[in-house]
Image: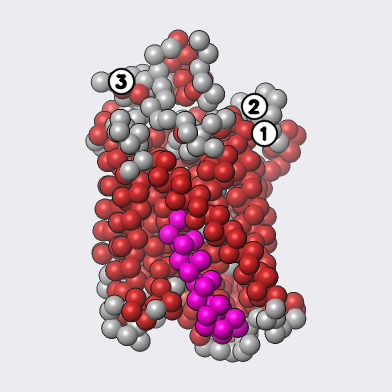
Amino acid sequence: MSAPTGDAELEEFGYTNKLKRSLGGFHTFAAGISYISVLTGTFQMSYLGLSHGGPAYWWSWPMVFIGQLFVALSFAELASKYPIAGSVYNWAKKLGGQHVGWLAGWMMLLASIVSIAATSLAYQNTLPQLWEGFQVVGDGSTDTEQAVNGILLALVLILFTTLVNAFGVKLMARINSAGVLLELIAAVLLIIALLFVVQNPPTVVLETSGTENAHGGSYLSAFLIAGIASSYVMYGFDTAASLGEESVDPHRKAPKAILQALIASAVLGGLIILLGLMAIRDLSAPELADSGLQFVLGDALGPVVGRLFLVAIFIAITVCVLAVHTAAIRMAFAMARDNALPGGSKLAKVSPRFQIPVVPAVLIGVLAVVLLLVNIGQPQIFTTVTSLAIILIYVSYLLVTVPMLIARLRGRWQADQQPGRFNLGKFGLPVNILAVLWGLAMTVNLIWPRREVYNAEPPYHWYLQYSSLLFVGIAALGGFAYYWFVQRHKIGVLADHAATTDESTAADEQPVG
């Protein structure tokens, strides 16, 4: 009997499928687009773009899209060939070996946990504007009160996503798909609504608002900081492939979902930011540096309409964190069944009732909460945690695109040639090269120890300004040291997850008990 669609590739890795294939095409697309979450990202980070680059920060949006498109195209080829849980981990392992794969998986898993914490903080920029009762801690007049209140709201959201994910993929997919549908409808309606309240011409995107003055007259310096606002949004499209073991016909649907999620988000987000900038009544309003486009909603559309769209943003944030949590669970599961994480047998155990690894769902939620509580006294937690999450994502993506490029140059990479599968053909090599160059450039820009990003307000401490280098360095070197001296000696597909067919003998790992 032939293996079900997608299971042959699992056997190539040495696995048997323990997850149930029940997700359709829209579920897969929804997972990718909800991770990107255009309404969450564009509004959550617009304050950073406007405060450091003025309306001209808009140009970073198409630039980031083009760069990430190179990465997404490379990932689409991989997804067509290997639609597998923990996509980044298994792709890096296949292309670069177990050591590279472990580091990619570790960085992506850590990035996902940080992203859950960072994205859940977006509630603070939305809920108190809907109703002042959501500002539980004080009146929100100080940065500290806002930071602590943001953490409190984030804790509630993480509890929700933990419970939903623990009760199975079907419940998650239904909530996520419904939320994505509402988000897409709201995004289109928002674009239409902003068209009716335009105040400025499209040339507003040439306005720097004098932000270059803080950088000795260099707008490039200001723009590189402001561009982080766009960098934050367009990632996570690989989630569509990470659900491959739970999807029907993933070889065809996963690549499409990756590209559709990125392109749809880029078009909608670009129009929302552009029309939002054109709807600003006062380009010098100080609220723009604090709340960004969320201030524009109420100011330009009025309090009632503005609040309605804030409800849509609230939904978008919720499903975004849900999708990030879902992706993190698959990453932990994928690494655990290789016994690549401590307590692998427990982390890889799939609940027969809920058909999902429940332990990772709970553990990841707990770790995200701990990350927030550790930083509760840091008023700049929002920007700092967000930036650290982005860096880890870009590093983990590089650990896939670089080995993929090396494999191409050495003639070891062959795209899937079966009819209907995604294949870049002769464009594969140049696209892969551009994906690597883009990833390297963005990683350097994001990790650069700027006070404006990592320690913008007093008290000033060197360890806060250099927190990006310290965090990434400790995460990479510390994690890999643990792997090298402890975990790598235990690597091997767990017996419960090992393929039982003849193909399993070709896998790199051998089953262990």
| CA neighbours of label 3 inside 10 A, class few (<14), some (14 to 19), many (20+) | some
Instruction: Measuring from the top left, give residue 301's x and y in whole percent.
Output: 59, 81
Along the viewing direction, whichever of 404 and 190 lies nearer the viewer = 190
Residue 308 inside the magenta-drawn segment: yes
> Distance between the Cα atoms at labels 3 and 1?
33 Å
Q: Earlier in the sequence, mark 2 or mark 3?
A: 2
Q: Earlier in the sequence, mark 2 or mark 1?
A: 2
Left or right of 357, for residue 79? right
The residue at 39%/14% (across/down) is 500
Above or below for 312 versus 484: below
Which residue, given by chain and number where applicable, does mark 1 sit on?
A: 422
Residue contact between numbered discs 2 and 3, judged by CB atoms under 8 Å:
no
Left or right of 41, for residue 334? left
Residue type, mark 2 in image: Asp
Q: Earlier in the sequence, mark 3 or mark 1?
A: 1
Which residue, given by chain and number where applicable, does mark 3 sit on?
A: 495
> Distance between the Cα atoms at labels 2 and 1?
7 Å
> Distance between the Cα atoms at labels 2 and 3?
29 Å
